[in-house]
Image (cartoon, rainbow, N blue to C red):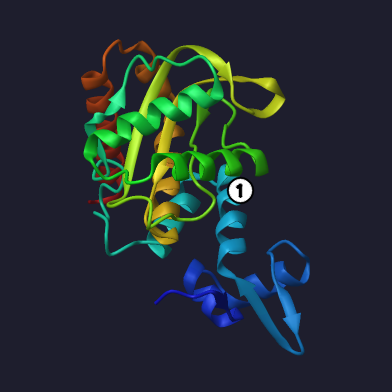
Amino acid sequence: MSHEVFTLDELARHLGRDRREIEKLATRGRVPGRKVGNTWQFHSAEITRWLEQEMRAYSSAELRNVEISQQSEDMCPELPVSSLLHPETVAVPLQARTKRSVLESLLEAAGGTWQIWSPSDILTAIQQREELMPTAYAGGVAIPHPRNPLPDAQGESIIAFGRTMTGIPFGAPHGGLTDLFFLVLCKDSKSHLQVLARLGRMLQLPEFGERLRDTEDSQTAYEIICETERQIAGQDGG
């Protein structure tokens, strides 16, 4: 069921966390919400953006809990990234030298699936998200995506990956440069959060980024991503 507004109990179930913990965090202003009388209200879009930022500091176990709580019926639960990534949506090397050209090139790669119906609308939405808060992480990785799902601009959910030959400014902390890019275009917020959590776990494996930087072609990069996700799934017993 889709919610525009969560009650306290609904949010606790949505996040798979204890009600008392969520209430304490909300009271301290650490979860975006507002109290109307004696009732807490939490807007789903605000919760999604809050959780996106929180996950940057999560451990692998905490990210695993996000995967479980946000599991989408439209995705393969064991391999959410690999199921949305395709050989034709991987571009190594990615021929781009600016933030805009990275996004345009990733969208072009995603368009190889014929599921991108309005690339200009998606590009605008991604740029607006970047202006609000850059999606670049420390360590040379960025996960650009729209602020909200765009069901009228695309068909199925898609992930595209690209690696530029040199790092470029993409808004990373402390002015760091970025060369690994995962474009995430999901049809709904649960799928989006599930993918972000899985990518976060993969990126915590130290050899993952190194292997992607060492590869010279798209097919090998695709295989590395799929192999790494199978490794995560194996650890989970999937």
Task: Establish if 179 lies above or below 191.
Answer: above
**Location of residue 72 in the rendering, given as x and y in whole percent from the top left corner:** 33, 62
Instruction: Give left or right: position of 33 versus 141.
Output: right
Q: Dot 1: what SS? A: helix
**Location of residue 4 in the rendering, given as x and y in whole percent from the top left corner:** 53, 74
Please count the marks in the image: 1
Q: Residue at x 48, y 36 (%)?
A: 143
**Location of residue 68 in the rendering, given as x and y in whole percent from the top left corner:** 38, 61
Quadrant placement of the N terminus:
bottom left
Q: Residue at x 26, y 47 (%)?
A: 79
Q: Amino acid at mark 1?
A: Gln
Q: Residue at x 45, y 44 (%)?
A: 122
Residue 103 or 46: which is nearer the viewer?
Answer: 103
Q: Residue at x 59, y 28 (%)?
A: 138
Instruction: Give left or right: position of 33 versus 223.
Output: right
From the image, tell me which residue sits under label 1. Answer: 53
Instruction: Give left or right: position of 205 versus 40.
Output: left
Task: Look at the image and tell me whether residue 208 can be seen.
Answer: no
Residue 54 or 6: which is nearer the viewer?
Answer: 6
**Location of residue 144 in the rendering, given as x and y in whole percent from the top left corner:** 49, 37
Task: Look at the image and tell me whether residue 114 can be seen.
Answer: yes
